[in-house]
Image (tube, helix red, strand yellow):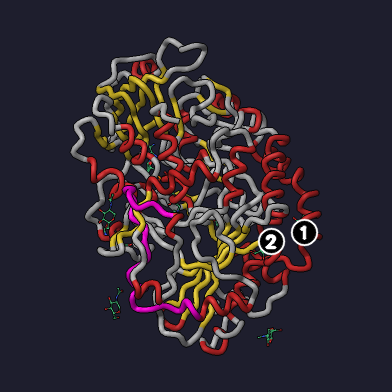
Amino acid sequence: MKHFFGFPFLALALASASTTPDQSFDYIIVGAGTSGLVIANRLSEDPSVTVAVVEAGTDQRNNPNVTSTEFGSGLNSPLDWAYASVNQTHAGNRPFAMHAGKAWGGTSAINGMTYIRGNKAEFDVWETLGNPGWNWDSLFAYYKKSENYTVPTDSQLAAGATYQRQNHGFKGPLHVGYTPALENGSYAPLVIDTWATVGVAHNPDLNRGDVHGFGMGPQTLDPALNVRWDSATAYLHPVEGRSNLQVLRGTVKRITWADKAGKGKLVASGVEVVDENGESTTLGAKKEVVLSAGSLRSPPILEASGVGNSRTLKSLGITPQIDLPGVGENLIEQPAHILVFSGNLPSAASAYHAFLTAAQLFGDELPTIEAESRANLSHWAQAAADASGPGGPSTCALEKLLRYQHDLIFQQNITIAEVLLAIAPGGLLASNYWTLFPFSRGSVHLGSMDQINAPVIDPRLFLADLDLLTLVAAGKFVEKFWFSEPLKTQGDVDGPVISDGSGFTRNATDAEWRAYLQNTVIANSHPTGSASMLPRALGGVVDAELRVYGTANVRVVDASVIPTQVSGHLTATLYSLAERAADIIKGLV
Ligand SMILES: Cc1cc2nc3c(=O)[nH]c(=O)nc-3n(C[C@H](O)[C@H](O)[C@H](O)COP(=O)(O)OP(=O)(O)OC[C@H]3O[C@@H](n4cnc5c(N)ncnc54)[C@H](O)[C@@H]3O)c2cc1C
Ligand SMILES: *[C@@H]1O[C@H](CO)[C@@H](O)[C@H](O)[C@H]1NC(C)=O
Ligand SMILES: *[C@@H]1O[C@H](CO)[C@@H](O)[C@H](O)[C@H]1NC(C)=O
Ligand SMILES: *[C@@H]1O[C@H](CO)[C@@H](O)[C@H](O)[C@H]1NC(C)=O
Ligand SMILES: *[C@@H]1O[C@H](CO)[C@@H](O)[C@H](O)[C@H]1NC(C)=O
Ligand SMILES: *[C@@H]1O[C@H](CO)[C@@H](O)[C@H](O)[C@H]1NC(C)=O
Ligand SMILES: *[C@@H]1O[C@H](CO)[C@@H](O)[C@H](O)[C@H]1NC(C)=O
Ligand SMILES: *[C@@H]1O[C@H](CO)[C@@H](O)[C@H](O)[C@H]1NC(C)=O
């Protein structure tokens, strides 16, 4: 649809009918991010199929802030949507920065590049919750399909890199390896011995379906060239010559629907795209529309298209097409914290990841916390449902999801906190740690049809008190770690180094820890769950083939379909999930 200058009412009327699109393709993928480019690559392997990817960001392959393997330079730059959440009631009543990439490659172009999958049970529960075929074993094949693992060199092995060959793929598009900086050595032996002192064992390969303990983590980079490997480098650049694949610049506002419904299901005809000048065009999709705009953007696109909680849609002036209360709900974000101690060690490469269980964090208090938190589940579900308002998610469904998570933690012994350490310049001992499986459930929604780039994000950090208890326990464990031998003496450890005027000190009381973390917690920018793959009765948005309920040809493939959290960092799993999704779309599984 072209811009009808002077006749906005006409444009509006036509926008809801099927119009002749400006261009048509078999598949339209919304978002050239981590997941979207996997789908684009795999679908366009068939030369008879045409694929267009619509992306708001641009090609940044020559931007050193992307290619560099130093983390952080892309943050808060034009490569970052840098969303702000609404003020967080239980976390200092302030807004939180939520980072997300805006470029070819999406968030994989700006992230920390850590490549870690998670614990087997965390994926098997997807199948238990009602998604046949989604489990660790089925994903394992696709982790390997996507991966081109570079075996560590002798000097990297000497610096603590470890791996088991059978867990890795060597023929996939995605380079995974250890940072070349390890060639200059590391503190791995000292760190391993100190973790052992506090009862945390060494893990020989963090990607074997078991992340318990301490291990050196590989990254999505090419170790020979020391450059980032994002989804554009891995999945787009090698196939740019395909004439049936295009990346178009624009922001997708909504899905357009065909007049005729197919077998009682809504049929997408394409998407409405807005350019930098605010002009709209439509693109036609002859086969399918795949939303891969990320956890914070795919749900608002569904809402703008009339798919979501009907009451919310009406209040935004949108005609409901499908009442699907799970859209934008069940948002799961991890509360994270950074605590720095001082020492006297020269800086060296770091890839130090530790994953801790509830038993390790809570010690003797474990039975009490297990029982108390079990009794709290229904309150947390109720609080999340109340916060979302009428027509939203069902308390009963949320409670069921929380109960499965509780069981994973307290019966199946999965890990509940990650600790990432760095021995940084200036003798600084940095610790970044987070609650892996929060019980708080948040939401992300379209705020208004005129503000499609400003989703209303409410992760509800610390709505469930256990999330704070876990973060406090992790912080105390981190302190115990730095002040344990051999690190304590060899590193001459002191601190913490506090520059925020809070007066937070060593050996703080639980009350002091709680207050400090509420005021200094940050969001981990790992949101999942906002368009969950779950049965409709559990608040699901997509089925086990990732198709949006009530539609014939719209799927979501990105972090929003992950119905839970995982201990791993998300990209490893998203590459695998998207590889499997591509095979589903092709009818191969
Ligand atoms: C700072 C930071 C550090 C992280 N570190 C790690 C790490 O070390 N390891 C790890 O595994 N994970 C990490 N993560 C998480 C991980 O990178 C993300 O979870 C993952 O990349 C998300 O992939 P996605 O496919 O869901 O979406 P994205 O990769 O975000 O892709 C979405 C794409 O859609 C585009 N888009 C959005 N809306 C529209 C629209 N309306 N129209 C057109 N295009 C649109 C966006 O511009 C973007 O390119 C990190 C995340 C952040 C923010
Ligand atoms: C890289 O990021 C820095 C700030 O983080 C910014 O000043 C610089 O302009 C960016 N470079 C490019 C090429 O975008
Ligand atoms: C949100 O928090 C900020 C910073 O604490 C404050 O300035 C602002 O007034 C708050 N906004 C609302 C709506 O409460
Ligand atoms: C995997 O990486 C190695 C080392 O960079 C490279 O030689 C090889 O061609 C890559 N394999 C594939 C299938 O891309
Ligand atoms: C090793 O250290 C030297 C000296 O600081 C530095 O020049 C070099 O780049 C480092 N090597 C790697 C692989 O980081
Ligand atoms: C749980 O995990 C911890 C840490 O790996 C381990 O020490 C412990 O034996 C496990 N407990 C059970 C019951 O599996
Ligand atoms: C249970 O909920 C109460 C009330 O919010 C809270 O004070 C307590 O810490 C919770 N306990 C656990 C283990 O989650
Ligand atoms: C903190 O507690 C440890 C262990 O009880 C003790 O050895 C140390 O002196 C204390 N340090 C401070 C600064 O209170």
Determine if the C-beta at disc 1 is less than 8 A from ligand 7. yes
Number of marks present in the image shown? 2
Q: Nearer the viewer, residue 433 or 19?
A: 433
The quarter of the displayed image where residue 486 is located: bottom right
The residue sitting at 64% across, 76% down in the picture is 198
Q: Position of residue 536 (x, y in %)?
A: 61, 28
The residue sitting at 39% across, 50% down in the picture is 107
Where, quadrant-wise, is the N terminus in this rendering? top left
Q: What element does badge 2 sit on?
A: helix
Q: Which mark is residue 358?
A: 2
Q: Which mark is residue 211?
A: none
Q: Is residue 82 magenta?
A: no
Q: Nearer the viewer, residue 4 or 130?
A: 130
Quickly name the residue at label 1.
Answer: 369
Q: Are marks 2 and 1 in contact (CB under 8 Å)?
A: yes
The residue sitting at 72% across, 70% down in the picture is 510
Question: As displayed, is residue 453 above or below residue 428?
Answer: above
Magenta highlight range: 168-189
Q: Nearer the viewer, residue 462 or 576?
A: 576
Q: Is residue 40 left or right of residue 323?
A: left
Question: As displayed, is residue 24 above or below residue 259?
Answer: below
Question: As displayed, is residue 50 above or below residue 397?
Answer: above
Q: Is residue 147 left or right of residue 189?
A: left
